[in-house]
Image: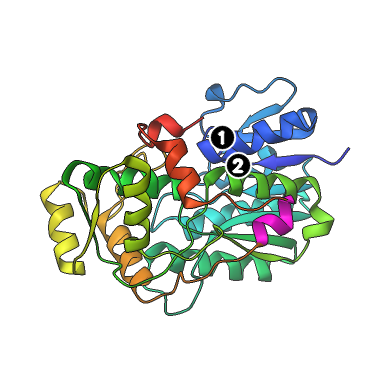
Amino acid sequence: MKRIVITGASGDLARRVVRILEARGAAERLILVSRSPERVEVPGADVRYGDFDAPETLEAAFSGGDTLLLISGLAINRRVQQHRNAIEAARRAGIRQIVYTSTAGIHPRNPTLSAQEHIVTEQDLRESGMISTILRNATYADVVATLMLAPALESGRWEHAAAGGYLAPVAKQDIAECAACCVLEPDRHAGAVYEISGPELLTFADMAAIASKVHGRHIEFVPITAAEAYAQFDAMGVPRSYQDGMKLEETDAWPSDEMVSASVSMARNFHALASRHVEFITGRPATSMEAVMQAAKGKTYAELQL
């Protein structure tokens, strides 16, 4: 029986993947690794402690696994070393294939801080000697429909520094289903690099129009500069750089350097890519931005978490 290791098992994306795998009868094949194993309750699964920052814990945590779903960490500026720790531990533990959650817009001149880190990890995977499958996930449509949209619902003005840029936000559940398919059929996806996106390219003006339709009120898109975006985040007390303890997967506490650099990247069209890879992997079309907004209506991002 080939076993599947999943990192970040207490996080929302991992929980979504696990739920899909449970429904497909794979619970007893799962090795779930987390810094907080007490938060992981999956009948039949093997739950283990493992910490990217404590590499001595990872080899034992990955032992006995065949395929590793390496869900990228959230500690910006520390992730490259964390991922290297995981890749090396996987090699020592005998993992055959790694499925890695990367990001859209992989390009050597993409100004987004996180993209630069994912570029390094993708190269580390290529040099590791192990088989890899890379999921380059676009911006979460769930984040667009909640955290990004929330101020606009109050003011009627959606201010953003990505004027004119296109992106194809993807539903987090679509990402989870792609990841589940890849770990269940690793041979089919061996060596692949997938662009996991929504079904259509949209500007923020387009998304404001969709939000207006869904919420039944006019929302105007207002382009702003990067400097103006920084000023807004500074006034809100958002730190510019990552700080230990920031609960990025549960809140909107992303550092402003990451958010503004991502906006600049979008404005320059580093994210202007829409694929049909969700459909290729899962057999069904990707979820539209309008459908995600409808499902998120009246909810916060935290309330969408499993």
Q: Is residue 290 above or below residue 57?
A: below
Categorize mark 1 by other alpha carbons within 10 Å: few (<14), some (14-19), many (20+): many
Which residue is rendered at x = 56% and y = 27% of the image? 37
Which residue is rendered at x = 77% and y = 59% of the image? 189
Q: Farthest residue in the right direction?
A: 1
Asked whether, in this view, residue 222 is left or right of residue 192, the answer is left
User: Which residue occupies the foreground of this view, 166 or 305?
Assistant: 166
Could you say which disc has been placed on residue 34 in the image? 1
Q: Is residue 23 above or below residue 62?
A: above
Task: Name the secondary structure under disc 2.
Answer: loop
Which residue is identified by label 2? 7
> Label 1 sits on what residue type?
Ser
Q: Are marks 2 and 1 in contact (CB under 8 Å)?
A: yes
User: Over which residues does the magenta segment extend?
Assistant: 277-283
Q: Is residue 275 above or below residue 75?
A: below
| Residue 167 found in image quarter | bottom left
Could you say which disc has been placed on residue 256 in the image? none
Cα separation between marks 2 and 1: 6 Å
Q: Main secondary structure of the magenta part?
A: helix
Asked whether, in this view, residue 276 is left or right of residue 131, the answer is left
Q: How many marks?
A: 2
Asked whether, in this view, residue 51 is left or right of residue 279, the answer is left
| Residue 50 found in image quarter | top right
User: Which residue occupies the foreground of this view, 25 or 51?
Assistant: 25
